[in-house]
Image (cartoon, grey):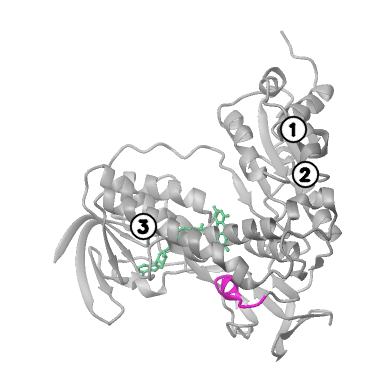
Amino acid sequence: MEHYDLIVIGSGPAGRRAAIQAAKFGRNVLVVERGRRVGGVSVHTGTIPSKTLRETVLNLTGWRERGFYGRSYRVKDDLTAADLMARLHITLDHEVEVLEHQFARNKVDTIRGEARFADTHTIEVEGEAGETHRFKADKFVITVGTKPFRPDYVPFDGEYVLDSDEILELTEIPRSVAVIGAGVIGVEYASIFSALDVHVTLVEPRDTMLDFLDKELVADFTHQLRDRGIALRFGAKVQKIEKLGPADCEITLEGGRCVRSNVILFAAGRMGATPSLNLQNCGLGVDHRGRLKVDPMTFQTEVPHIFAAGDVIGFPSLASTSMEQGRIAACQALGEKAYDPPEYFPYGIYAVPEISTVGMTEEEIKERGIPYECGVARFRETSRGHIMGLDTGMLKMIFSLKTRRLLGCHIVGEGATELVHIGQAVLNLKGTLEYFVENTFNYPTLAEAYKIAALDAWNRMPPLSE
Ligand SMILES: Cc1cc2nc3c(=O)[nH]c(=O)nc-3n(C[C@H](O)[C@H](O)[C@H](O)COP(=O)(O)OP(=O)(O)OC[C@H]3O[C@@H](n4cnc5c(N)ncnc54)[C@H](O)[C@@H]3O)c2cc1C
C-alpha cells in the first residue's frame, strides 16, 4: 500500500493550496478528487463560472455603457444561453489546465475517485468503475467543500427548479426567475439575471439580507436592486413550491402571497460534503450541516493528525479564505512555521453592482463603544466616474476618533472588489486617515474616492493633537 506524508481530500482552493504548500516543503503528497476534473466547486460550479457568467452578461448586454446610452442599450441583441456558455467553457478549461500544470510542476500526485476513511491513517479511494485503491498517510487535510442544500419540499427537476450548481446548465434564458435565499449566491445570481433583463423576484424568509455587511451599504444596494425592478419578497417563509407546468413554477409564501416564474433557483444554504467520507472510521463527527469543527488558528480537528480547511469548516466559505486556510493547515499538519491569518480579510460579493468590504461595520464599531467618524464618497464625484457614466457607487470609510486609524472600508459599485484592497492594506498596516489625505492618487481613477471619503471624514474629525 502506498504511503504519503500528506493526503489531501478534495482539489478545490483549500486542497490545492494545502497540497502545493506541502510539496514545496519537499513532502510527498497525494490529492484525491472525485470530480471529473480537478478544481472543486470554485472552478466548476461556483466562483469562476458565476464570475465568468457575470462578466459575459455585463459585456454582451452593454451594461456598463447604459449610463451614457440609456437602459435599452445592447451590445448584442437576442442574447442566448449558448452565447453565455461559450466563454464559460473556455475559462474553465484554462483554469483546469493551470491547476493540472501546477500539480505536475510541484510533483503532487493526484488520483481520481471518492475517498473514504478505512481507519485513522488509511483511506480507500473508489474509482468510477468501482475499483478501489488504499493509501496510508501520516497526516490528512480534509478539503471536501460543500454541496447545495436540497430540502425535500423543493421539487428539484434539473430543468425549471434548480440549485446553484444546476443553474449553469440552463439551455434557454428564462423570462422570469424567482431566487429563494438572499445570501451571497442568491443575490449574485438575482442581480446577474436582472442585468439580462430577466424579471427577478428575490425571496428571503428574514427581513434583511447580507447581515454581515455595513447597513448603509446594504441600504444603497437594496435601493439599486429595487430601482432596477427586482421584486424583493422579504420576511415571509416559503410554504409551498409547485411546478404547474413546463416553465411555470409557483412559490406560495406564508401569508398567502404567490410568486410565479419560469424558473426557480433555490440558493438557501449548502451542506458539508462529508457523508461519503466514513468519518466514523477515523473518529470524527460533523454538525447538522455536515461541517467539521477545527481550531480556528491551526485548522486541526479533534483527531490530531487530521486537519480540515475551506467550506467544509463553515464561515466565511470563500475561495479566497479557503486558499489561505489550506496553506496554513498544511504548514500546521507538517510542523512547519505558519503565519497567523491577518485580522481582517476582504469579502467580495460579485453582484451587479459589486460589493466589497473589509474591517468593522459601523454597527460593530458602535457595539464596541469606539468613538468614530465616517467619510463617504460617491463615484459620481470622481472624474473617472464621469468618464464611465456612473451615477451609482459609494465608498464609505470609518475612522477612530481617538487614533485616527481606519477601522472599516465598505464599497458598493463598479470595481469594488479591486478597490477594496487599498483599504485592506491601510487597515492591516494600521494606517490612519492621514494616509488618504496626504497621498496622491492616480487621476482620473475610482480610487480617488478614497481621498474624497477621507476628506469628508476629516471635515468632521477633531484636529490632530500634537
Ligand atoms: C455560486 C457560487 C459562487 C461563489 N463565488 C465566490 C466568489 O466570488 N468568491 C469567493 O471567494 N468564493 C466564492 N464562492 C465560494 C467558493 O467557491 C468556495 O468557498 C470554495 O470553492 C471552497 O473551496 P474548498 O476547497 O473548500 O472546496 P470546493 O471548492 O468545494 O472543493 C471540494 C472538492 O472536494 C471534492 N470531494 C468532495 N468529497 C470528496 C471525496 N469524498 N473524495 C474525493 N474528493 C471529494 C469535490 O469533488 C470538490 O472538487 C462561490 C460559491 C458558489 C457556490
Residue 171 belongs to magenta span: yes
Q: Is residue 433 above or below residue 66?
A: above
Q: Amino acid at mark 2?
A: Gly
**Residue at 44% across / 49% down in the picture?**
323
Extent of the magenta region: 163-172
Residue 231, image x and y in percent?
A: 82, 68
Q: Residues within 10 Å of mark 3 (few under 14, many from 20)?
A: some
Nearer the observer: mark 2 or 3; the answer is 2
Q: Is residue 359 above or below residue 96?
A: above
Q: Amino acid at mark 1?
A: Ala
Residue 334 in sight from this viewpoint = no
Q: Secondary structure at mark 1?
A: helix
Q: Residues within 10 Å of mark 1 (few under 14, many from 20)?
A: many
Q: Could you tell which of marks 2 and 3 lies nearer the N-terminus?
A: 3
- Estimate the spatial distance between the alpha carbons at disc 1 and disc 3, rounded to whole Å: 46 Å
Mark 2 sits on what residue? 393
- Indicate the quadrant where residue 117 lies: bottom left
Q: Could you tell which of marks 1 and 3 lies nearer the N-terminus?
A: 3
Which numbered circle lies on residue 432? none
Q: Is residue 321 above or below residue 440?
A: below
Q: Secondary structure at mark 3?
A: loop
- Estimate the spatial distance between the alpha carbons at disc 1 and disc 2, rounded to whole Å: 10 Å
Which numbered circle lies on residue 449? 1
Front one among 422 and 228 = 228
Q: Amino acid at mark 3?
A: Glu
| Marks 1,2: beta carbons within 8 A | yes
Quarter of the image for the N terminus: give it. bottom left
Nearer the observer: mark 1 or 3; the answer is 1
Mark 3 sits on what residue? 302
